[in-house]
Image: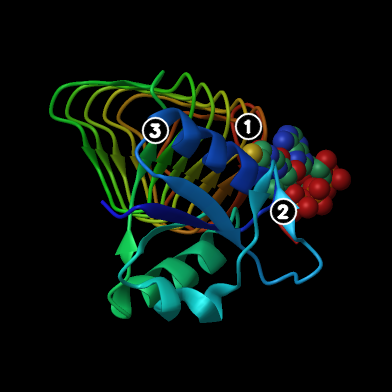
Amino acid sequence: MKDILIIIGASGHGKVVADIAIKMNKWQSIAFFDDDESIKASMGLKVIGNTTDAYIYIDKADFFVAIGNNATREKVQEKLMDEGMSVVSLIHPSAVIGTDVEIGIGTAVMAGVVINSSSKIGKGCIINTSSSLDHDNVIEDYVHISPGVNLAGTVKIGKGSWIGIGSVVSNNVNLCSGCKVGAGAVVVKDITESGTYVGVPVRRVVR
Ligand SMILES: CC(C)(COP(=O)(O)OP(=O)(O)OC[C@H]1O[C@@H](n2cnc3c(N)ncnc32)[C@H](O)[C@@H]1OP(=O)(O)O)[C@@H](O)C(=O)NCCC(=O)NCCS
């Protein structure tokens, strides 16, 4: 644990992430990096550089990538890790984490989340506000579980998938990598082909 936490991305998602870090009370100072030079501060926290400046802080700072897009977050986090930066996970103090739960590097667990026993969360995931993940879930790397999602027991979500706000996945259902599930959708069967799925029960959106 270093003295400074640098959050990459000063957008709305970055603000929610910064709030978690403030509440964790582990860093002497918290600042942002953002590639938009016009943003000087966010929520009273300074923007002190952009991703190309990370090496300046290699000995002094922990890093967290607060970029909502799964593929971009993966790219930036993997580069930081390859360069030997310290990437941390952020877990809101109100989150309820069960026994035998694993949470990967660079993952954010937001306010009001419940993750039940023996679930495994990969690296660089967003487990967003008030989502509920029951027992024995496997959430692969760089997945976004949106606010208010309910995952039943023994659900598997493949790498880089985005599960939309308020959606539901029934027990023992597997989603392959690269799935996008729409707001309010209900998934009751395995999804084996990447793509966008909406509705109750879900149908694939064909373009
Ligand atoms: C699923 C989603 C990603 C699709 O976005 P898109 O690729 O831009 O697709 P479109 O808006 O063009 O919609 C395609 C079709 O699916 C329908 N559709 C889109 N989202 C839907 C949803 N959530 N439920 C039901 N139908 C939906 C549209 O009405 C449209 O139907 P049509 O072809 O019959 O007209 C998006 O609508 C969505 O639900 N995003 C989730 C947002 C979210 O969770 N935000 C939280 C961030 S923290």
Q: Element type at marker 3?
A: loop
Q: Determine whether 71 is above or below 201 in the image.
A: below
The answer to whether the beta carbon of the residue marked 1 is less than 8 Å from any atom of ligand 1 is yes
Q: What residue sits right under mark 1 in the picture?
A: 165
Q: CA distance from mark 3 to mark 1?
A: 29 Å
Q: Secondary structure at mark 1?
A: loop
Nearest-to-viewer mark from 3 and 1 = 3
Residue at (30%, 50%) from the top-left corner? 122
Is residue 123 or residue 170 the one in the foreground? 123
Q: Nearer the viewer, mark 1 or mark 2?
A: 2
Q: Is residue 173 left or right of residue 168?
A: left
Find out if the beta carbon at label 3 lies less than 8 Å from the nearest ligand 1 atom. Answer: no
Q: CA distance from mark 3 to mark 2?
A: 20 Å
Q: Position of residue 191 (x, y in %)?
A: 45, 46
Q: CA distance from mark 1 to mark 2?
A: 28 Å
Question: Which residue has dot 2 on it?
Answer: 41
- The quadrant in which residue 156 appears is top left
Q: Quadrant of the C terminus?
A: bottom right
Whether the residues at callouts 3 and 1 have beta carbons within 8 Å, the answer is no
Q: Amino acid at mark 2?
A: Ala
Specify the amino acid type for callout 3.
Asn
Count of numbered badges drawn on the protein: 3
Frontmost residue, 172 versus 29: 29
Residue that extends furthest to the right in the rendered view of this protein: 38
Q: Residue under circle 3?
A: 25
Q: How is the image coloured?
A: rainbow
Q: Is residue 182 visible?
A: no
Q: Describe residue 192's horizontal placement relative to residue 15 as left or right.
A: left
The reply to whether discs 3 and 2 touch (Cβ–Cβ < 8 Å) is no
